[in-house]
Image: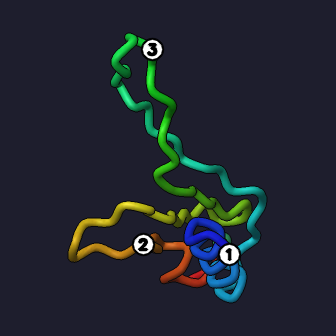
Amino acid sequence: MTRYRRLVRDLRQCAKWRGHKIGNGKPIWLPSYATDATGKDLPDRLVGYLLECKNCGKRGTVDLNPLPNGIDIGGEIVAIGCND
Ligand SMILES: [Zn+2]
């Protein structure tokens, strides 16, 4: 299992454990804004994943490139229960 899939699974499990009603999250892609030597656009990069509760709207994210002092899973959805 890739690091991305593992982090997405952990985020979803944690949100469920908090009582949130989660649907399909969505991958977050970042445009490269760059071209290769031939002038062709480089492909977008997968940088994370966004999950939102259908009940309360709280959100959580996976960040594949956290800052050195940052965390790779975060957001209210993993910190606060659904109806708190
Ligand atoms: Zn919720």
Residue 80, percent across and down? 52, 82
Comparing marks 3 and 1, which lies closer to the viewer? 3
Residue 46, percent across and down? 52, 47
Task: Please report whichever mark, 3 or 2, sits nearer to the chain's N-terminal start.
Answer: 3
Question: In the rendered view, does 21 fall on the left or right side of 67?
Answer: right
**Most foreground residue, 60 or 44:** 44
Where 46 sits versus 80, above or below?
above
Name the residue located 28 percent from the left edge and 73 percent from the top edge.
70
Where 46 sits versus 78, above or below?
above
Q: Quadrant of the N terminus?
A: bottom right
- The kind of residue tagged 2 is Asp
User: How many residues crowd around disc 1 within 10 Å: few (fewer than 14), some, or many (20 or more)?
Assistant: few
SS for dot 2: loop
Residue 21, percent across and down? 76, 70
- The kind of residue tagged 3 is Lys
SS for dot 3: loop
Quadrant of the rendered image holding ligand 1:
bottom right
- Kindly identify which residue carries mark 2: 72
Task: Please report whichever mark, 2 or 1, sits nearer to the chain's N-terminal start.
Answer: 1
Name the residue located 59 percent from the left edge and 84 percent from the top edge.
81
- The kind of residue tagged 1 is Arg
Res. 9 mark: 1
Residue 67, percent across and down? 25, 66
What count of labels does the image hold? 3
**In 3D space, how far apart are the residues under numbered discs 2 and 1 (Cα atoms)?**
12 Å
**Most foreground residue, 53 or 51:** 51
- Kindly identify which residue carries mark 3: 40
